[in-house]
Image (cartoon, rainbow, N blue to C red):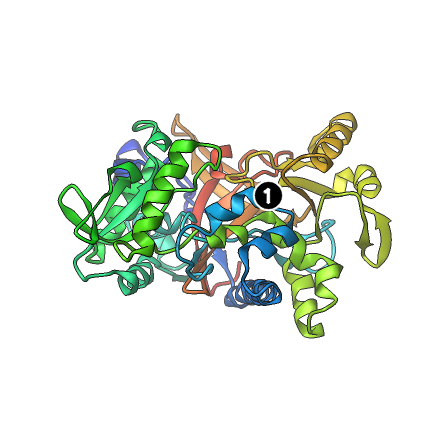
Amino acid sequence: MTGLLAPRALTPEELASVTAELDAVPVPFRFALSAARLPTATFGQMSRTWTAFRRGVEAFIDRYDGDAGRMAKALGLPEQLVPMWESLPARDWHLIGRPDMILGTTDGTGPERCVIVDVNAGSLAGLFPLNDMLLRAHQADVLRPEFGACGEPRYLMGRFADLLRRHLTHEDGLIALTYYADEAAGDDHFDNWHYRSLALELARHGLTARSVHMEDIEIRDGAAWHRGARIGLVHRYFLPDAENPHHMAELGRISAAARDGALRSITGLWGEILATKATLAMLSDEEFTSELPPSLAADLTEAVPWTRRLTERHTFWRGERVDLLDWSLRNQHRLVIKPALGEKGRDVLIGRELTAADWSALIEQAAGAERPWVVQELMTATPKPLSFQDDSGDLHEITVPVVYGSYVLDGEFVGAIRRYGIKGDGHLMINGLQGAVPAPVYWGTDD
């Protein structure tokens, strides 16, 4: 059972009844007419993958006594960014997260693994509201007979709201969904839907949230205010550009207020060090794992795909000592290159999708870049069937690779959303900006 019980395209009226709430935000994704389902055992597998990763990160933090400068140096990250990362008071790095996981293999054969391919930890992690909005859309009359028998839906925003409520400075305080004014690009801004949907979802759970430009936060009387409302918590969506003087000046102003106790942020910037792809490289590198307890090292080998910071060095690939740059040049079909400080899938390049000349130039450029890049083994995602309607209303039923945004709240794995790569096996960068179709996972039935 992969689509509607009787696969068909919905009429415009039926589709409008299903997606009215999504369109009101508006959500910039296609709507899946098929259910994303995984066995309960896979929930446990994903939870174990996250737990291994978390334990590995905590071992890394302990090794460097939580010192931001030392951790950044070990990860090869620019030291000039350390003052920015240290500016806000530190908070737990794993309070909110949505690490990307792949269920698949390295070569299309062998047992299926569950691995984390991107960290996405911290308050910038998204798609939490979308999960609940889509689950409610599935309860529309035309879809309820199908989706009602798919397994256990996992709603998230109640727990999300409880997490935020625990950090509020006062019970009726405003939750400021805070970002820089120059990040807003009008109603067609891709992220605009995300701020609006989060405010709406939190309102369902009794919390008042509002999109707030950092520049509009007023500090007075020992408190933070926005348009007459006292801010009880800053949900940080801003990530400063260290080379932008305005960004850094505003960060300094907000940081001073946070350190003086005038406002509180749900996450600091310290955790951004750990949210980089360089962390994946560290946790899979024998130079780090050789000093871990054997059981944790083995768990990390399963949870993190082979990843290395792209530098001139020797390392090991499946027990064989190799020259990293030379080996990477010769094995482009099994590798991916990513900027360690990248986001939203930008500049993620799949070796098998490039020409040999482009790959060679990329290796040379990345190895000599000021900011680090990583090279990672390509995971072959297990494809899944998808039914959706295009803009003309025509129904499409295709089988495509998928990636999972795995939800983490308060340090625990709590659910997942599946993203379908509708561009197919020849375009493995599966991201919302690339047209991926999201669908919340139901648990407990055979897949």
Q: Which residue is mark 1?
A: 78
Horizontal side, residue 4 vs residue 54: left or right: left
Residue 205 screen position, x and y as percent:
22, 58
Residue at position x 76%, y 32% from top? 364
Q: Between residues 430 and 72, which one lies in front from this camera angle?
A: 72
Residue 224 visible at all: yes
Horizontal side, residue 149 vs residue 117: left or right: left
Horizontal side, residue 98 vs residue 184: left or right: right
Q: Between residues 420 and 289, which one lies in front from this camera angle?
A: 289
Residue 38 screen position, x and y as percent:
51, 59
Does residue 196 lie above or below 55 as drawn? Answer: above
- Please give the count of numbered marks on the rendered protein: 1
Residue 143 screen position, x and y as percent:
33, 48
Does residue 56 lie above or below 248 as drawn? Answer: below
The amino acid type, in three-letter code, at marker 1 is Pro
Which quarter of the picture shows residue 14?
A: top left
Q: Secondary structure at mark 1?
A: loop
Q: Between residues 10 and 426, which one lies in front from this camera angle?
A: 426
Does residue 126 lie above or below 25 as drawn? Answer: below
Residue 145 screen position, x and y as percent:
33, 54
How many residues crowd around disc 1 within 10 Å: few (fewer than 14), some, or many (20 or more)?
few
Residue 18 visible at all: no
Which quarter of the picture shows residue 357?
A: top right
The outermost residue toward the left is: 228
Residue at position x 71%, y 30% from top? 354
